[in-house]
Amino acid sequence: MVSNTEFKYDLGVVGLGYVGLPLAVEAATSSLKVLGFDINSERVEMINNGHSPIEDISNEELSQSHKNFHSTIESKELSQCRNIVISVPTPLTDYQPDLSYVINAAKTVGENLVKNQVVILESTTYPGTTVEVLIPNLEKMSGLKAGEDFFVGYSPERIDPGNEVWKFKNTPKVISGINNVSTEKIQSFYESIIDETVLVKGTKEAEMVKLLENTYRHVNIALINELAMLCKMLDIDIWEVVNAAKTKPFGFESFKPGPGVGGHCIPVDPEYLSFKTRQIGKPVRFVELAQEINNSMPLYVVNQVNEILNKNKIILNSSKILLMGVAYKKDISDMRESPAIDIAELLLDKEVDISYYDPYVEEFKVSGHIIDREVDTNSFEDYDMLLVLTPHSKFSQLEFNNLKTIIFDTTGSDFIKSTERI
Ligand SMILES: NC(=O)c1ccc[n+]([C@@H]2O[C@H](COP(=O)([O-])OP(=O)(O)OC[C@H]3O[C@@H](n4cnc5c(N)ncnc54)[C@H](O)[C@@H]3O)[C@@H](O)[C@H]2O)c1
């Protein structure tokens, strides 16, 4: 254990992904000295060479931050950081929360921990993780005492990849600490890089904030997906209904139906909540129902595809379908948990000839098959159907109007003149 009050870096970021990298770049741009630490040496090399691995940070922004930002795979350098933020993945493995990345990161930080450092967890997780998992690992590896020798807190990340309005700096940040000193230090750190902080009374509450935000989205998406399926049976245009309902200026937030939920957050985070409540013997009934409905959407879409082709006298297993947009959300390349994967699997099972068109995704692999990538926008008419799964903004530059091909838009985008909608 080393004692160190003169730190070379104001901030160390552990995990340079969709969450960690924007934080590191924002802090460096705000003149803080920043160290990035990641176990992925290729990623570290890319970042140090000014090549951004994520769409939200341009190569120019990354290069401009280099005066104050250096990345490494050498964990020893973490002892030189006044504040350390951990932003490593928290996925599901076998449908269970997998905290192995957080535990490994905590051990690495713990091995290099010195007195007076501040450690903040930003990974999304179940309430209790900071106190029950992070702190014991930090204390065990360092021999130091949390709250006395070093300071700890939790702050959920609200980054929304691809969002041009709400970025890291102007999105209010919820913060918490395990005691007053920790909270004060954490607040003063975030206030140096973010416009507004929102203090909550403890780490459990801060951890729960993130789960509430994403469970709320998950449940409301499920509600609108269920209504979309029912409206189809009742011959009611769900889009007409949603668009009219959202003109109500109070008491209603609009959600759109779609082919399913994807990404690292919406399908995953409610599982973290259920995991925690099962410990007290209680299910979160809303979450279970929402999961059932949202998980059924890929099959619903494939059944709709079959019906639409049938209507047009085309047989599903001899059809050619182009999947338009396979990333889990628009304007990014992230494929994690994308419903396009399930839909492609179901179509492959039915021996449909599928290709994909996605300006952001270079390779689309499904159950070991590499799906053909269409790059020629003049060949759209070679397909029986364009199946829109993710409405990338770049699609608005494509000419859909005079196409004879069936366009089935599962996303309700306003710039695609579809023949069919979910
Ligand atoms: N992506 C989002 O939109 C988003 C939004 C809010 C919150 N979150 C949460 O933030 C956390 C991180 O997500 P992400 O999307 O940035 O993940 P990511 O996969 O994009 O990046 C994680 C990075 O952590 C690195 N890493 C893994 N183990 C490590 C270790 N032991 N030490 C150092 N680096 C390590 C990986 O190599 C990777 O570069 C997750 O808990 C996620 O749920 C993500």
Image (cartoon, rainbow, N blue to C red):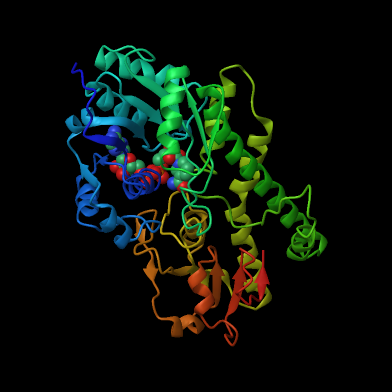
Q: Which residue is located at x 48 percent, y 47 percent?
A: 159
Quadrant in which ligand 1 is drawn: top left
Q: Which residue is located at x 32 percent, y 58 percent?
A: 61
User: Percent position (x, y) of residue 215?
Assistant: 61, 38
Report if residue 97 is visible in the image. Answer: no
Using the rendered view, name the quadrant where residue 362 is placed: bottom left
Q: Which residue is located at x 54 percent, y 75 percent?
A: 396
Q: Is residue 180 above or below residue 81?
A: above
Which quadrant is the C terminus positioned in? bottom right
Q: Is residue 292 above or below residue 160?
A: above
Report if residue 291 is visible in the image. Answer: yes
Report the front residue among 295 and 20.
20
User: Percent position (x, y) of residue 101?
Assistant: 34, 32
Left/right placement of residue 269 relative to residue 225 reads: left
Q: Is residue 258 above or below residue 184?
A: below
User: Percent position (x, y) of residue 276?
Assistant: 55, 23
Q: Which residue is located at x 37 percent, y 18 percent?
A: 135
Which quadrant is the N terminus positioned in? top left
* Residue that sits furthest to the bottom in the current view: 402
User: Percent position (x, y) of residue 382?
Assistant: 48, 83
Report the front residue among 209 and 302.
209
Report the front residue among 239 and 229.
239
